[in-house]
Amino acid sequence: MTKPTKTINIKIDSKLVKNFALEIGFDNCGICEANLPNKSILFFENWIAAGKNAEMTYLERNIDIRKDTSLLVPNSKTIICVTLNYHQVSDEKEFYISKYARGKDYHIVMKEKLAILESKLKQEYPDLNLRIFTDSAPVLERAYAFKAGLGFIGKNTCLIHPKLGSFSFIGEIICNAEADYDDNIITDHCETCDLCVKACPVGALSIFGLDANKCISYHTIENKNEIPEYTAKRITNQVFGCDICQDVCPYNQNIPLTKHEELLESEPAKSLNLNKLELLTNSQFKKQFISSSLYRAGKRKLIANYKLVAAKK
Ligand code: B12
Ligand code: SF4
Ligand code: SF4
């Protein structure tokens, strides 16, 4: 006789989950149903169709998963979205490393905390099926965080919380149980402001989103080839990433600094310079940088970025 399939019919306690999340140290937590309005999907599809993703061709794949999280977690019903504040002092450096990349790689920090939340949920609901993500799967993280009430999407395309600003990473747990959902969606707070659009040195921001073909962040992190002249000419001190469209935002003034020490500036970012980089062998580079977001760019790219900035002096 075959065993009958167990029907999973759990409803998780949203208040309990949020308490767990805050206890673990997340700065915010919101919970939404695992689906997106057509306009979010359409925004993404139009963005790809217009080629705004530049050479990030991986974004063109798995559109079906972006539309349906059940392809990641069967019968997924709920997304628990969390944020981690990484805000830190933005001093004018000769060689600028974006705030998000100055400490330990956020994927590691976020996943460690999400794993704690996962085990607490498994303890509470042993039959729950769930998976943790942060920038690790075709999930439209900003759109879900918006739906979960964690902020609005600004003209700089970032998720912005009116009190916590936008210097926050997003992570999520997708699970197959129902929950009480947040219905306190924070609608557009940009209104007539367009400081970020005007401040962007390459004119990458418009109502169609961010044009990665121009963006300094894209070219100094993701683009494996030479930075095109249009953007290279407009880079001033950015060796890795760019924070301009967030630094100018009124919602990022007087916001709390991060309480997560591991996200603050530390080695290898702290004392990085061209000379040090050039002296490193590939294996030394790997050993020293593997836990830093800077590793993503690779040694060759970082050296090229440093040289580009140094040539401006
Ligand atoms: C590709 C990518 C990039 C690309 C393209 C960025 C972009 N704006 O599209 C590049 C390399 C340029 C980049 C840069 C940065 N990134 Co990035 N990136 C991603 C990634 C992997 C995919 C984003 C994507 O799909 N873009 C395509 C566009 C169309 O989608 P979207 O920006 O997510 O917007 C969606 C919604 O916001 C919605 N939408 C847009 N406008 C509006 C307006 C309204 C009113 C509504 C309702 C909805 C809506 O439509 C879109 C589709 O649903 C995500 C991780 C992930 N899986 O989501 C991280 C992610 C977006 N990046 C992040 C970060 C931290 C950065 C940088 C700050 C790093 C740096 N300092 O250099 C910069 C910020 C630059 C900027 N202004 O966006 C965070 C953002 C956190 C936040 N608070 O918003 C994410 C979520 C990673 C994470 N897990 O924390 N990134
Ligand atoms: S990250 Fe920099 S280059 Fe990219 S859109 Fe923002 S201000 Fe412009
Ligand atoms: S700078 Fe102004 S327009 Fe840009 S995201 Fe912030 S509030 Fe919105």
Image: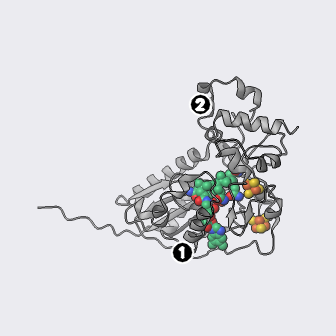
Q: Amino acid at mark 1?
A: Asn
Q: SS class of the residue under badge 1?
A: helix
Q: Residue 205: x, y in percent?
A: 74, 62
Q: Amino acid at mark 2?
A: Lys
- Label 1 belongs to which residue? 38
Q: Which one is nearer the viewer's eye here, 239 or 135?
A: 239
The residue depicted at 77 percent of the width and 49 percent of the height is 231
Do the residues under discs 2 and 1 have CB atoms within 8 angstroms?
no
Q: Which one is nearer the viewer's eye here, 11 or 217?
A: 217
Q: Quadrant of residue 69?
A: bottom left
In the image, residue 278 sits, relative to residue 79, either above or below, namely above
The residue depicted at 44 percent of the width and 67 percent of the height is 12
Mark 1 surroundings: few (<14), some (14-19) or many (≥20) residues within 10 A: few
Residue 286 numbered tag? 2
Label 2 and label 1: CA atoms lie apart by 42 Å
Q: SS class of the residue under badge 2?
A: helix
| Figure colour scheme | one colour
